[in-house]
Image: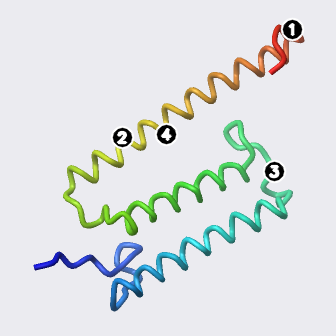
Amino acid sequence: MAHEHKLEIFRGLWKFKSNTAKIWGVLAFLTFVTIIEVVLGIFKPEALMGHVLGMKALNWIFIILTIVKAYYITWDFMHMRDEVKPLRRMVVWTAVFLILYLVFILLQEGGYIESVYASGFIKTDF
């Protein structure tokens, strides 16, 4: 007997009658988030250009919205919701670790490049 997939998203706040309807619902949500990203990218509101934790607030919004989209793509389209808890944790914690490691490397290298340019000594033109 085939395993039935859960037909709700947002922790049960939005329920669907079929898998097809759920796919369209998740697609509509992801499209909405993408439209928000595109509109913010085109207009770049001045209110979001202030610095928060070393980066523009607009960049933080883009990062958060991208993580939300990645979560829903993995959770619903890749059916992680229907997997056993240890597998879900393994996938999620591995991704979290790799993302944090990438951010650490980017911040370290970015800090080095900024310090090279700030000191006025340029050995290699990047």
Q: Is residue 68 left or right of residue 54?
A: left
In this view, the residue farthest toward the front is: 1
Label of residue 121 in the image: 1
Q: Residues within 10 Å of mark 4 (few under 14, many from 20)?
A: few
Q: Is residue 63 left or right of residue 118?
A: left
Separation of residues labelled 2 and 1 (CA atoms):
39 Å
Instruction: From the image, state whether disc 3 or disc 4 is nearer to you.
Output: 4
The residue pinned by badge 4 equals 99
The residue pinned by badge 2 equals 94
Label 4 with label 2: CB-CB less than 8 Å: no
Residue 114, percent across and down? 77, 22
Q: Residue at x 39, y 81 (%)?
A: 13
The residue pinned by badge 3 equals 49
Of callouts 4 and 2, the N-terminal one: 2
Q: Secondary structure at mark 2?
A: helix
Residue 35, percent across and down? 68, 71
Separation of residues labelled 1 and 4 (CA atoms):
32 Å
Task: Pick the quarter of the image with the N terminus.
Answer: bottom left
